[in-house]
Image (cartoon, coloured by chain):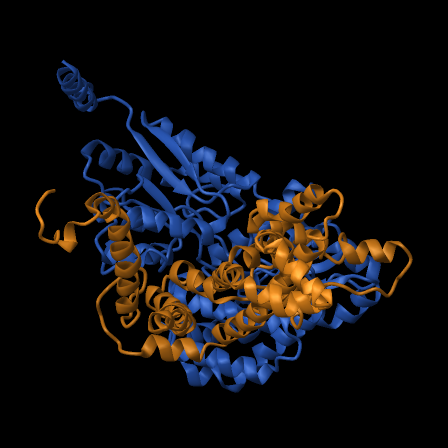
Chain colours: A blue, B orange
Amino acid sequence: MRYQFMTAALAVTTALPFAGPAAATDLEVTHWWTSGGEAAAVAEFAKAFDATGNHWVDGAIAGSGGTARPIMISRITGGDPMGATQFNHGRQAEELVQAGLMRDLTELATRDKWAEIVQPKSLLDGCTLDGKIYCVPVNIHSWQWLWLSNAAFEKAGVPVPKNWNEYVAAAPALEKAGIIPLAVGGQPWQSSGAFDVLLTAVGGTDTFLKVYRDKDAEFAAGPEVAKVFKAADDARKMAKNTNVQDWNQATNLVISGKAGGQIMGDWAQGEFQVAGLTAGKDYTCLPGLGLNEVIATGGDAFYFPLLQDAEKSKAQEALAEALLDPKTQVAFNLKKGSLPVRGDIDLKAANDCMKKGLDILAKGSVMPWTDQLLSQDTQKQKEDLFSEFFAKPDMTVEEAQKRFADIVASAD
Amino acid sequence: MSKSERPNQLFRNLNAKVASIPMVLTAVVIFVGGSAWTVLYSFTNSKLLPRLNFVGLDQYYRLWSTPRWLVSIENLLVYGVLSLVFSLVIGFVLAALLDQKIRFEDTFRTIFLYPFALSFIVTGLVWQWLLNPEFGIQGVVRGLGWESFNFDPLYNSDIVIYGILIAALWQGTGLIMCLMLAGLRGIDEDIWKAARVDGIPTLKTYLFIIIPMMRPVFITALVIIAAGIVKVYDLVVAQTSGGPGIASEVPAKYVYDYMFFAQNLGQGFAASTMMLLSVVVVIVPWAYLEFGGKKRV
């Protein structure tokens, strides 16, 4: 009798999904957006997806991308894939795609003309492997920003600098006033990212591409890059009194005027907003450190693991469409503080700094970023090098550059 | 069972043998099999997914030319030697002091053992705060008027590993003390009386009579401490995340970071194989002396 009941129950549960064609499909979406502004932004996606008659099951993983990615990857490789997952588009999910674990979205992309609506075009390149499209870019986050505290410069009695060189020149005055000239948190990716920004700003876009795209080790050991290391040495000296770990703690030093500035991506803007500061009045932002105004097309994207379930696969398509919807793009990016991936929408509510970013984007001054050019392995080696360089004042510039060239030589 | 011939050796204690099959399988498949798999794949260039694409010793060449790995090894050596010595010495001295038939022995024992109830993560966070120059010990002492007092091991590359050592000792010595105390209680009262009759001073009795008699306890303590040293990871993550820079990195963290953050399984496997090798190098000669030697006697 027991068994009969069990089989009956089993039959009912398996029959359920076929009960009605319009039944809502649950789709689990994993991501690492857990801070206040991020969670508010991702809720916009959930709302848009639920409006399509499906149901968004939130799978937020706390503790930044570094913590979340291994969990996501082991779920996909371990045979328990979620419905959709966030990655930074570029090479993070490259091997998963090569192993055939991710869904090919080319058909959908052609039907919805992604190639026409996604701006700048290089964004889709980050999602493309062997001519096929595997992800939906949802925003642009660029690293090349210098955030300055107007109050700190006022206290030091110097004008707010307009570029990196003026900033370096103002450092002694800041220091005399008891202000940390530059805040760099202890997490390895921060010092590594700051160097990459210096590489684009001081060295120029071509230098950056020659080192990271062409992986020219000889060039990386040469005089052009030596100039960048000289700037990194300045940054190291300016940052030596920062005793914080997390990036947002470092941003807080700038917000409270204890530090003069910070080199950080545009996600830092959310912190300034939450603190109630006004762009241009309380803080100043310099894209490309005021030297080379470009925006790197890094950012977030959603990937869709290959599923057997036909209902869920259909829901995946609905989600992909919802993510690129103009209304969703506006709502999401305003809360996230990032730039939208479509050129045809109007961001009236954007603040000064975001407008600067949009202008640069409209001019087409874009470049690929390290997420697209370098493997995670190379990125990690770089992080190890620069976290050591920034923490160890007795490490010479020459030694650091030699090791940097070695990493570039073995980069893939 | 009236047959006179000798029963087959294989079927002696059959129940016990059947009962131990799961554990034997676990040991063979999970431990030995998993280790062999790891060693095999450490000779490949596996990235995010394991692939059998052999590259010889490339991963090992890279490993031993990576500054971060060398720093990790150096840290492990410093941490290992000091943690072994201090755990045993402090543990034994505390146990010997508690063994003097003092009042409130239970209370003291509880206080000393209590940190062991905390995980390494909690221990790490507690000590991160205590050693924070602004809020911790340095801040308090400066607040008392000693303005030039300087004690910020976690922010100084040269001594950061000692900051971690302090937390590890605080957490671990209580357990060693309890083991030692049990060992001391196991020593027959008559030994003490005999030593006293012979006029041997207390210190000498401890050093030349009691400690040699406590050999098994010391071996147990040694194994527990040594296992803790090789796998130290969570304490570092909680206290410094390897910083400042890479000054407090340890091998286990290198393995984890390269396997999961850098998506380079081959490199992580090579590093974990080196860890396994170092354990084998220590354990095999010791096991040979301990177990192999006795048969001949």
Q: Residue at x 29, y 34 (%)?
A: A318
User: In which image quadrant can residue A306 be found?
Assistant: top left
Q: Please tell me which residue lies in front, A40 or A411.
A: A411
Q: Position of residue B105 (x, y in %)?
A: 71, 45
Q: Please tell me which residue lies in front, A188 or A405.
A: A188
Quadrant location, the C terminus of chain A: bottom left
Instruction: Kindly give the residue lying farthest to the right in the view shown.
Output: B145
Q: Position of residue B130 (x, y in %)?
A: 72, 53
Instruction: In the rendered view, tell whether residue A22 sits above or below residue B213.
Output: above
Total label count?
A: 0
Q: Position of residue B264 (x, y in %)?
A: 36, 65
Q: Residue at x 67, y 66 (%)?
A: B205
Instruction: In the rendered view, tell whether residue A381 sits above or below residue A66.
Output: below
Q: Is residue A219 left or right of residue A352?
A: left
User: In which image quadrant can residue B131 be found?
Assistant: bottom right
Instruction: In the rendered view, tell whether residue B216 sits above or below residue B115.
Output: below
Q: Position of residue A29 (x, y in %)?
A: 37, 38
Instruction: Kindly give the residue lying farthest to the top in the view shown.
Output: A1
Q: Residue at x 23, y 64 (%)?
A: B51
Quadrant location, the N terminus of chain A: top left
Residue A103 visible in this rendered orientation of the protein? no
Q: Please tell me which residue lies in front, B64 or B235.
A: B235
Q: Please tell me which residue lies in front, B139 or A349.
A: B139
Q: Residue at x 53, y 81 (%)?
A: A401
User: In which image quadrant can residue B280 be found?
Assistant: bottom left
Residue B208 visible in this rendered orientation of the protein? yes
Q: Is residue A101 left or right of residue A152?
A: left
